[in-house]
Image (cartoon, rainbow, N blue to C red):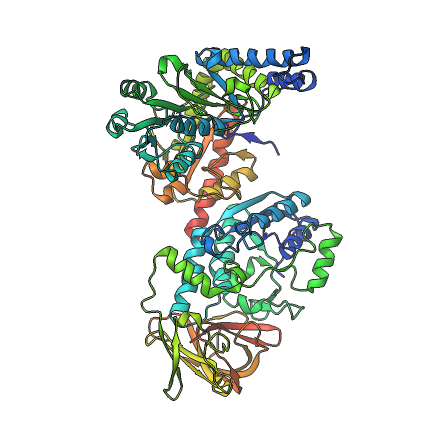
Amino acid sequence: MQRFYFDHNATTPVAPEILEVMVSCLGQVYGNASSIHYFGQCAKQRLEAARRQLATLIHSTPTELIFTSGGTEANNMAVLGAVRSADARERHVITSAIEHPAVLSPCAQLEKEGVAVTRLRVGASGVLNPDDVRRALRPETVLVSVMHANNELGTVQPIAEIAAITREAGVLLHVDGVQALGKIPVDVAALGVDLYSMSGHKLYAPKGVGALYVKRGARMAPILFGGHHERDRRPGTENVPGIAAFGAAAELAMRTLAADGERLENLRDRLESAVLNRIPGTGINGSKWGRTPNTSNLYFDGVDGEALVISLDLRGFAVSTGAACSSGALTPSHVLTAIGLSSDRARASMRFSLGRSNTAEQVDALVDALEVSMAHLRRISTHA
Amino acid sequence: MPENPAGERIAVAMSGGVDSSTVAALLAGQGHEIVGMTMQLWNQRRLPELIPEGAAAGSGRCCSLDDVYDARRVAEQIGIPYYVVNFERQFEEHVVKPFVDEYLAGRTPIPCTLCNNYIKFDRFLEMSDSVGARQMATGHYARIRYDDVSGRYQLLRAVDPSKDQTYFLFGLTQEQLARTLFPLGGMTKPEVRELARSMGLAVASKGDSQEICFVPNGDYAAFMTAYLKETGIEPEQTRGSIVTSDGRTLGEHQGVHHFTVGQRRGLGIATGEPLYVIATDPLSQRVTVGGNHQLLRSRFFAHDVNWISISGVSEAVRAAVKIRNKHEGASAMLHPAGPLEGQSGGRVEVVFDEPQRAVTPGQGAVFYDGDLVLGGGWIE
C-alpha cells in the first residue's frame, strides 16, 4: 500500500541533505567539543557553524543560542529558569490556555511551588488578544509565555504586540516557537522577544535536538547542573551530529521557506476547499487567516475522529486528531475545547499538517479517501 | 460459526493477555486481514489511593501500559495494524457508575456483563464497523453457531467448563452474535497456551486477568469509597444497623454497599453460630443476617430477560439456571411473568426444584438447556 504523510506538525522526515550531514558527522566528527585536541576542535567547529546557521535563520547573534535536547527542554528551561531567577517573594506568570503541555506543565509545577499562574483564554479564532496580556499584568509578574504558532490550529499569535507590552512593563517574554520555525519567517530581534524555544525535528532535522534563544542580558537560572557547556547554561556533552543537522536544517529553511510556504499554503487551501465543498457538516476550527501555511484543523460533525484516523490509516493516509496520550489513545484536545468547541465537535476534529513531500495529487487522493471514509462512518452512525 | 471467507477484515479486541493474543495470531494465520485494537477503558492513574505503595501506577492491571505494551508487541510480531481506542467515557457511564449505583441500592452488580453489553459488543463493534471490519473476534470462552431450523444464532457453553464465560454473555443480541467470532470456544485453556507457545507469542505464559478489571485486588468497597470521594457523590446515609430476621439489633455497619448476600466475613459480630448476610435494604440501611438455612430460596423473578437460542417463552419451560458465575446451575421451571412497571424487557419467574443458596439481587440468572444458552435476565 502506498502511504502518504500529512502529520508534519507531529514530526518531519529527515531531509536527505540533512541526513548526509548527520551521518558524516556521526562517522567522522566524534570528538568531544570540550576537548583541547584536534578531534575536539573539529567537533567544536561543527557546533559553532550550526550555531551561526541557526542564528542567521532567526536573526539573533550566535552567542544568544543554547542547544538543548529538544523543544520540551527548551520550554522547561525558559519557563522554570526565568521564573526561578527572579528572587522576589511573590511571583506571577502569564500564559495562555492553548499552549503546548511543554509550557503548561512547567507552569503547573511552578504553581505547586507557590508561583501564581494566569492562563489567558482565547476566543473562537484561536488567537490571543494582546490587551488581555496587558490587563493580566501585575506588579509581581515575572514572565509571559506565549506560543508563536499553535500546533493544532496553526494560528499565529500577535507576538510583536505582546512584546511591546512586556517590554514596557519590564517583564520577560518567552515564546514557544517550535511550530513556527521553518514554517514562517522568525526574526527574534524584530519581534522583540527575550526567550524563544525551537525544535529540530519540526523542520526536517532529527529528533533529540532543539535550542533556546536567550536575548543578551536576559536573566536565566539553570535547571540542569553538571558542566560548563553552552556558557554554563546547559550542561552535558553536546549532541554534535544532531546540532550539525539542526544547523543544516536552518540553512535549508533559509533557502526554501518562502517558496515552500507559498506552495504548502496553496495545497492546504486546495485541501480545505475540496473538503468543505464535497463533504457536508465540515468546517475550519479557529481563524482561517493568519495561520502557518501548512496547517489545517477541520471538524467533521457526527463522526468519531478516532475512528476516522484509524480508517484513514488503513487506507494509507497519516493524519492526526489531537494530542496523543501515553498509551497512544486519544483524549479531546485542550486547544479545541479552549476555543469553545463542544467535546463532541472536538472529538470529530482532525489536523492535517502538510510538508515538503506532499503534492497536489496526494491531497486529492486524501480528499477522496476522506469522502469514502466519511460516507461509511456516517452510514454506520445513523444505524447506531 | 458464521461463514467468514478468508481475507475478510476482522477486528480483534486485544487485551494484551494470552487469550486475545492467540485469537489475533490464529485468525491472521488463517489468512484473514486482522486489525488489532485495545480498548482503553479506565485510567489507572485515577484514584491513586488504591495503588499499593511502591507499585507503578496501574501496573499489572487491566488497561495498564504494560498490557498495551504486550498487545502492541503481539500485533507487531504477527504483522497486523494495531490501535488503542479510547472508550473511557463510555465505560464510566455504562459500567462504573451503574456498578457503584447498584451497590448503593443494595444489589450486587456484575460489571463484566454490562461491559459486554455496552462496550465490547456495542462500542467496539461499532468501531470495528468504522474501520471496515464487519466482524469482530474476542478471546471469550464460548461458542456461537447458526441454527438453520430456528433461524437464530445460538450461544453455547465453551468446551472447557472451567473457563466457560457464557454467564457474562447473556445480553448478546442476534445482530451482535451474527457479527462475533469466539475462536477459543472449542479449546481448553492449556490448549490455548500451547497454541500460543507454538506460535511463539511472547505472552504465552502470562497470568490470567483478575475478575473485575478496574477494582484493584478485588476490594470493591475500597474502590467505592475512593470513587465516591473523587466524584463528590454523597451516599445519603452510610451507617445503619445489622439486624436478625426476627428484629434483634446486633450491631452497626458502615453502609449497605459493603455487604453482599451470602457474605460471612467482615460482619464484626461474634456469635455462637456462623452468621451470613441474608438481605440488604438501602432505604432503611438495614443489613439482615441469619443462619445459612435462611439463605435458601426456591423462587425469584428475573427482569430484562434477553432470549438468545429461543425467541421467548409462552408457557413454562424447564432449564438449568445459573445464579452467579461460580454456581453449578440448578434445575428449575421458567414461568413467563408480566413486565414490571417502567421496564421494557421480558420477565420470568424462576422456580427451582431444590432451594438454592444466596439468590442475590443484581446478579444475572442465565438459563441453559444442556450447553445451549436459552437466555438470561437480572435477579430482582
**Does B233 sit left or right of B91 as displayed?**
left
**Does A259 sit left or right of A128 as displayed?**
right
The one of A105 and B133 positioned closer to us in this rendering: A105
Could you say which quadrant of the image residue A95 lies in? Answer: top left
Could you say which quadrant of the image residue A339 lies in? Answer: top left
Percent x, y of residue B217: 54, 62
The one of A176 and A339 positioned closer to us in this rendering: A176
Answer whether residue A280 is visible to the viewer in this image: no
**Does A94 sit left or right of B26 as displayed?**
left
Percent x, y of residue B355: 52, 86
Residue at image point 55% right, 44% down: B83
Look at the image and tell me in which quarter the N terminus of chain B lies: bottom right
Name, please, the residue furthest toward the right. B198
Whether B287 is drawn above or below A75: the answer is: below
Residue at image point 40% right, 86% down: B245
Look at the image and tell me in which quarter the C terminus of chain B lies: bottom left
Percent x, y of residue B378: 45, 72
- Count of picture labels: 0
Percent x, y of residue A223: 48, 28
**Does A290 sit left or right of B201 as displayed?**
left
The one of B319 and B269 positioned closer to us in this rendering: B269
Whether B153 is drawn above or below A41: the answer is: below
Answer whether residue A15 is visible to the viewer in this image: yes
